[in-house]
Image: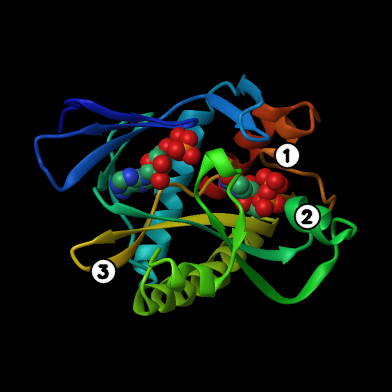
Amino acid sequence: MEKLKQIYEGKAKKLYETKDADQLIQEFKDDATAFDATKRGTILNKGVINNKLSEKIFTMLEKEGVPTHFVKRMNDRDMLVKKVRIIPVEVTIRNIVAGGMAKLLGLEEGIILKEPVLEYHYKEDKLHDPLINDYHIKALDIATDKELEAIKKYSFKINDLLRKFFDSKGLMLVDFKLEFGRHKGKVILADEISPDTCRLWDKKTKEKLDKDRFRRDLGNVEEAYQEVLRRVME
Ligand code: ADP
Ligand code: UDP
């Protein structure tokens, strides 16, 4: 499958049409942004690593019954996916307090939550992805009741599967972000799952092995992404 017209360039990926109207190619870039893209940089080989990690994770999730947009990884940076209409909601699941939740509620990072917390953020860069809840989503027709039920069910299932998966690699899944889309009348998981979209801490040392190394200038950013890939591929 070849790349035809580029239809989108985002902060971390580009999207291309293919000759199949139902399929797109997502190209993973090395560009990194944080804090509403006020901080910009590159992380060497991030695109290649995130493409491989997403492939591995989407394949695992599909096997466990979660429908995803993943079709196949084509090469280092390109992934063939089903074209969806993205539901403009970023779903965050948190197992441990960090980042936005620590800030919002004045909590220490690292508190283990009694149960996972699900949050919705309206996907609109101009508004800085504001926190919303089920009622906003339904009242504003952002998604239907039925779609929201599917999103919630899949998100918690994905959390269970990902926690187990990363735990077996010596990694704690602190939190992560998901995006879903509409495809042939169904809700399926889209976008990517990678250290750009998950917080991952080493189980023993609690060392951060994710995009927080870039956000917070902790150094060894490339090494952290490499380390996650190495462990996941073992
Ligand atoms: P952003 O738009 O936030 O800068 P990216 O650079 O990761 O993010 O761009 C990828 C874009 O592609 C996102 O807007 C995402 O919602 C969208 N997307 C992801 N998967 C699909 C898909 N299967 N079909 C259509 N759009 C998708
Ligand atoms: N996240 C993401 N894209 C975003 C915002 C957050 O992938 O636009 C991920 C982030 O990497 C973390 C989780 O979602 O794993 C929760 O992020 P949080 O709300 O704490 O936001 P941040 O720390 O980025 O302000």
Q: Is residue 108 left or right of residue 75?
A: right
Ligand 2 neighbours mark 1 (CB distance < 8 Å): yes
How would you rate the neighbour count of disc 2 (Cα within 10 Å): few for under 14, some for 14-19, many for 20 or more?
Answer: some
For marks 1 and 2, the one nearer the N-term is 2
Are the residues flagged by discs 3 and 1 in contact, CB closer than 8 Å? no
* Residue labelled with disc 1: 212
How would you rate the neighbour count of disc 1 (Cα within 10 Å): few for under 14, some for 14-19, many for 20 or more?
Answer: some
Residue drawn at the location 51% of the way across and 24% of the way down: 30
Residue 198 in view in this figure:
no
Secondary structure under the numbered disc 2 in the rendered image: loop
* Residue labelled with disc 3: 186
Question: Separation of disc 1 and disc 2 at Cα?
Answer: 10 Å
Are the residues flagged by discs 3 and 2 in contact, CB closer than 8 Å? no
Coloring scheme of the render? rainbow
Question: Separation of disc 3 and disc 2 at Cα?
Answer: 32 Å
Q: Amino acid at mark 3?
A: Lys
Q: Amino acid at mark 1?
A: Asp
Ligand 2 neighbours mark 2 (CB distance < 8 Å): yes
> Could you say which is closer to the camera, residue 69 or residue 73?
69
> Could you say which is closer to the camera, residue 201 or residue 16?
16
| Residue 162 picture location, percent across and down | 55, 63
Question: Separation of disc 3 and disc 1 at Cα?
Answer: 33 Å
The residue sitting at the left extreme is 19
| Residue 89 picture location, percent across and down | 48, 57
Quarter of the image that includes the N terminus: top left
Q: Please give the label number shown on residue 44.
A: none
Are the residues flagged by discs 1 and 2 in contact, CB closer than 8 Å? yes
Q: Quadrant location of residue 78?
A: top left
Residue drawn at the location 79% of the way across and 33% of the way down: 216
For marks 3 and 2, the one nearer the N-term is 2
